[in-house]
């Protein structure tokens, strides 16, 4: 399966890498650092609250992440998991144990310009489509890449690869409910 996922990324001139144990530990620590920064940053908390929907608002939302799609809280395990509830209570959410050995993939591009970002997005799409044939679930856990100092550390120093554009968590999991999407006409400018 890994070779199929790598080939899917390569079709868009990107590279998908599966970090070895020491590099995986480093990336997981970077994810935890980014999560801590997010929790302590008032702007980050405001952004999370702006894009998540609780209570009656969740049932009529046309964008964002409604509470029914938050998933359970992590009770145990090493899997990186962004808690969309933040510090807000969500009734009947529950918790569960996640995998003790996270399965991450890093999506690289040669450069770090707008064309590379586009390639990374297209490669991400192809990788996730290929993963669904397994049927693997995929989730972005790229928040360490939002901090320049952490992003630099996510790169594998031994391989000399280009720029890490995305961190993907792959594995088997329960089916998730669909989340709302805005109409294309509201988000695409063709002028």
Image (cartoon, rainbow, N blue to C red):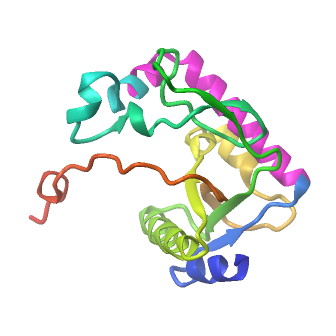
Q: Residue drawn 57% across and 80% down?
A: 8
**What is the quadrant of the N terminus in the image?**
bottom right
Q: Position of residue 169 (x, y in %)?
A: 65, 54
Instruction: Name the foreground residue: 89 vs 35.
Output: 89
Most distant residue in the right direction: 22
Q: Residue drawn 79% across and 67% down?
A: 160
User: Principal SS element in the magenta part?
Assistant: helix
Give the quadrant of residue 49.
top left
**Magenta region, residue range:** 22-47
Instruction: Name the foreground residue: 165 vs 75.
Output: 75
- Residue 60 position (above or below residue 169): above
- Residue 78 position (above or below residue 135): above
Q: Residue drawn 25% across and 33% down?
A: 59
Residue 176 within the magenta-colored segment of the rendering: no
Instruction: Name the foreground residue: 19 vs 67.
Output: 67
**What is the quadrant of the C terminus in the image?**
bottom left
Q: Residue drawn 67% across and 61% down?
A: 106
Q: Position of residue 54 (x, y in %)?
A: 34, 24
């Amino acid at each position: 399966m890994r070779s199929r996922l790598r080939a899917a990324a390569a079709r868009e001139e990107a590279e998908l890498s599966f970090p070895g144990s020491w590099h995986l530990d480093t990336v997981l620590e970077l994810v935890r650092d980014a999560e801590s920064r997010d929790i302590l940053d008032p702007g980050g908390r405001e952004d999370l609250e702006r894009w998540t929907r609780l209570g009656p608002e969740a049932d009529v939302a046309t964008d964002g992440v409604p509470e029914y799609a938050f998933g359970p809280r992590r009770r145990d395990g090493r899997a990186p998991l962004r808690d969309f509830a933040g510090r807000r209570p969500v009734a009947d959410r529950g918790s569960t144990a996640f995998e003790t050995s996270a399965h991450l993939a890093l999506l690289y591009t040669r450069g770090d310009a707008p064309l590379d970002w586009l390639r990374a997005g297209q490669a991400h799409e192809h990788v996730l489509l290929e993963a669904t044939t397994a049927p693997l679930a995929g989730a972005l856990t790229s928040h360490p890449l939002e901090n320049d100092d952490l992003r630099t550390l996510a790169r594998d120093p031994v391989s000399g690869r280009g720029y890490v554009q995305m961190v993907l968590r792959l594995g088997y999991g329960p089916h998730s409910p669909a989340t709302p999407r805005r109409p294309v006409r509201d988000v695409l400018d063709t002028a």
